[in-house]
Amino acid sequence: MPGMEAEGGVGGGNSLAAPTWAVRIRRGDGTIAGAGVLVDPEWVLTHAGAVVEGEYVTAEFVGTGCASQRAVADQVCAPDAGGVALLRLDRSGPAGAASTLRRLSVPHRSVRMYGFPAVDGPGDWLAAGTERVAGSPDGRVRLAVAEPASAGFHGAGVTDATTGELVGVALPADPGTNPDRDGDHAGPYMSPAETVAHHLSRAAGWTRGWAAVDERLRVAREGEPAVFHPDFARRLADWLRGDRPRSAVPPPRPAAPSAPAGGPAVPAAPPSPAGPVRSPRPGRDGRQVKISQVRDDDSVRAATLRRALLLADRELRGPVRVSPQTDPPPGGLDLAVDATGRHTLWIADRVADRLGVLPEGPEAIDGGGPDLPVRRILAAPATLTLVVVGVDQAADPDSLLDLLALLRTRGDRMLLVFRHDGAHYARAQSQLVIEPSQQRQALLVGRLNAVTGALATALHEAMAEVAADCDRALEALVKAHAVRTTVAGTAGVVAGLGQDPDLGRFERVADRAERRIKEAVDRLGPLIERRDELIGRLDSYQVLHQEALDSEDLAAEDLYLAAYDLLHARPCDLEAAEIAMRAYADFIERWSSRHPPGDESKDGTPRPSTDPGEVPAQRQDQDPASARHPDEETESGKEPEPDHAAGPKWDHAASPDPDRASGPDPNHVSGASPDHASDPDHASGPDQEGDAIQP
């Protein structure tokens, strides 16, 4: 890809080599201030937190191995106004190492950034992905990173993972966020190329690619008023804002109405009533396809549409801010084209260019053909938010609608503006809005039925076995039941017609319930297995203990019954059962250490030794002088006659065993509680009728 490398690529998205434009920024004390991008032989682009204006730092050209240079912070934007900075080098950097930025769509794009996790040595690549919709006041977009990004990645160049083109600069995460607590909401940001160009006037010369808004849509038509339609502006802002949770970035500061320097004029707001007005929370319209109508003779709606497109453009937007309800966020669109009189292939080529799909591979070898842009679009992993104005006035509206149908299947969001409500308008409503909405509603109903049916049953069954905190899962389940009832009513009919923006909210409720219930069931499963394991251990300890004695041990029995009741309770308090089981096991183990195997028989008498060479123990009533070795003869040379009548004598009173419980109950089934005495599975120990072990 020689052409791409000349424009700032790194030889392909999978390259592990250090890019030539990569710069490590070091402060005077030797600490790493961050990373940077050589965008011009004399300029380095980085993040605003790396330097203060006028500060001198050292720029290290890691990708080329050239000598370091001193640089000064020439321009530093505020963290909430771009968050980028420009460093001017003392002299020109390495020849041919500088790179340009590329204007590309942002949603669902796989990217990589090259930063410096270590103080010295080479840098490293870090994989990430962009959010679907931007919503920050300065056009930045949050990145979902594969691993936490250290300060050495702040200011790093962000490249497209497929083409290797530079698409932006990495910015630090919000202060106070924690990856373990906040998840993806604690990730760093990317300032896209258009956001950089908006805040740094010099960056326009280092940025290439088509602008997001068509030139036709930037210029006001003759006789267009300087005011806009508030209700239409609110609906456009809701759709351009998208169906995404609100960003953690602080809201924009109000600014005086004015036009951007050198940019198109933005219609002003109509006069507002005197007195303070409470601003309601901005709405969100998550519909994938929205169809509007702006007639040729409706200059107010035309001005409102143009205003919304310019405010949603990261690069062309002005500082005009009226209300969060009528002002779309910068980055709300990726491409806006005027289809009037234009062919479908022209629009397809603009879409493919915005997606950044290169005409390479088999298509380029065989010549491609007229459908090459369409095939390139369908193969692109990234998505975009597209606005097409004048759909019914295109050179071939039917083929354009065919293209738009393909884009819908890819997941692209589209705002389609018609001039009239004729046959093409009706086809678009049916093919792109109503039919997909009905299919989407049917899938949602199926998911809600599964959540409130099989998944809910699995959760209740698991909760009946062991006690655990499942409040979040139960709360999500209750909301899923409520949404299921709502979708089954009038709201579901409206959603099926594609007229309900809350369908996306209903899907999020189903997603949340499905995720939380599965997490709860997965968390309860090991607890149930642990309870069953403890029950098995409890039975094993009881059998071992009862095999060692005949008399009932009341202390052990009490501990056993306490653990048994806790383990067989429903739901089982596993923490308390663990403590009770441990107490019973400790008691049995202490008892076993004082009564090793072979120490005594079940009736308490000493067990005879099984070692033929062992000398029998002396009886307590035997005279030590009369004790003889078995091989020793008497004076008469004959062995004495054994006294069978006397038997072994063991003075239990002289050596009482405090751990021995006396008085076994012959009718008691050891180990069974009164509630389980009739359960043969819980009766343990030898059979009292005839299976007792003989001494």
Image: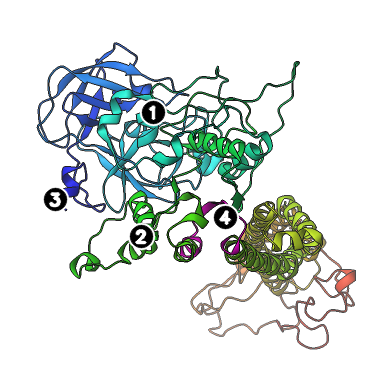
Residue at x 16% of width, y 53% of height: 1
| In the image, residue 412 lies in the stretch drawn in magenta | yes
Residue type, label 3: Pro
The mark that comes first in sequence, 4 or 1, is 1
- Residue 84 x/y as whole percent: 36, 25
Query: Distance between the Cα atoms at labels 4 and 2?
Result: 23 Å
Residue 540, by quadrant, is bottom right
Q: Read off the residue under disc 2.
A: 345
Circle 3 or circle 2, nearest the eye = 2
Quarter of the image containing the C terminus?
bottom right
Q: Crowding at label 1, few (<14), some or many (≥20) Cα neighbours within 10 Å?
A: many
Q: CA distance from mark 3 to mark 4?
A: 38 Å
Q: Nearer the viewer, mark 2 or mark 1?
A: 2
Q: Which mark is residue 198?
A: 1
* Residue situated in front as seen by the camera: 87 or 543: 87
Which residue in the structure is indicated by mark 4?
288
- Relative image position of residue 643 (x, y in whole percent): 70, 81
| 617 relative position to 116: left or right | right
- Give whichever of discs 4 and 2 has the lower sequence position: 4
Q: Which is more foreground, mark 3 or mark 4?
A: 4
Q: Earlier in the sequence, mark 3 or mark 1?
A: 3
Mark toward the start of the polypeptide (3 vs 4): 3
Identity of the residue drawn at 69% across and 70% down:
446
Cα separation, mark 3 vs mark 1, equals 29 Å
Task: Decide whether residue 6 is among the magenta residues.
Answer: no
Classify mark 1: helix, strand or loop.
Answer: helix
To which quarter of the image does residue 239 belong? Answer: top right
> Is the residue under label 1 in contact with that under label 2 (CB below 8 Å)?
no
Q: Which residue is mark 3?
A: 2
Residue 571 versus residue 119: which sits nearer the camera?
A: 119
In the displayed structure, would residue 203 be above or below residue 210?
A: above
